[in-house]
Amino acid sequence: MAKPDKVAAVSELKDKFTSSHGAVLTEYRGLTVAELRNLRRSLGEDASYAVTKNTLTQIAAREAGIEGIDEQLAGPTAIAFIDGDPVNVAKGLRDFAKANPLLVIKGGVLDGKVISAAEVKKLADLESRETLLAKLAGAMKGNLSGAASLFNAPLAQAARALGALQTKAQDDPSVLAAGAGTAAPEATEADAAPAAEESTPAADAAEEK
């Protein structure tokens, strides 16, 4: 490769390292062109998958401020640069590797930090961002529907109850797994109760009569 071409290749790789959410390094030795095409198709818009030269990748990673990647650059390397959900990309590569053992996950980069092959596999075992958001929405819906008094409570009390739910989810993530069946947090009843005790002009007038 001529020097201008190398400079351009390094610049492109550096841009990918800095603009993507992360990257997964793989060894593709023995995979056919058709199999690589299927892999790219399976990753979809979440990642771009490209064969790279190790020496140029080392330079590009260094210029992008990524340290410690050299050990992963042994043998033929192809990199999946993550544009979407890192969990989806990790799952896609893991599943493809199960069906095509010639694909080897060597490690990667996430948020500018180098991660091992084992950490990529752990990432693949997580639930996607969309799934986690759906569970959170389900948990909130279940709590709110089970505490109808909140809708009649003053806004400040309702806000405190929602804050209690959010705090409970942070302290105990298992509430997200319960979905719509999750019980309302204890703070909800405490916050909603004062609403029934508050007096109104109409109620005061009725008592005077």
Image: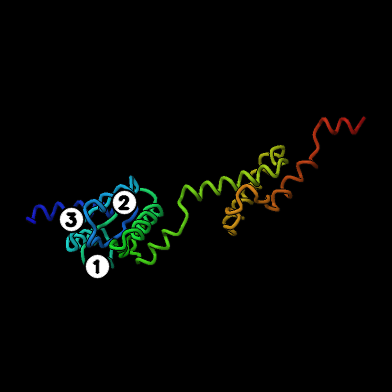
Name the secondary structure under disc 1: helix
**Which amino acid type corresponds to the residue marked 1 in the rendered image?**
Asp
Q: Residue at x 37, y 59 (%)?
A: 94
**Disc 3/disc 1 C-alpha distance (Å):** 15 Å
Alpha-carbon neighbours of circle 2 within 10 Å: few (<14), some, or many (≥20)?
some
The quadrant in which the C terminus is found is top right
Residue highlighted by disc 2: 20
Residue highlighted by disc 1: 70
Up the image or down, 181 lies above or below 110; here it is above
Q: Residue at x 31, y 63 (%)?
A: 101
Could you tell which of marks 3 and 1 lies nearer the N-terminus? Answer: 3
Query: Residue 24 appears at what percent x and percent y?
Result: 31, 58
What residue occupies the far left of the structure in this picture? 2
| 110 with respect to 190 (left or right) | left
Residue highlighted by disc 3: 10
What residue occupies the far bottom of the structure in this picture? 71
Query: Residue 144 appears at what percent x and percent y?
Result: 65, 43
Q: Residue at x 18, y 53 (%)?
A: 11
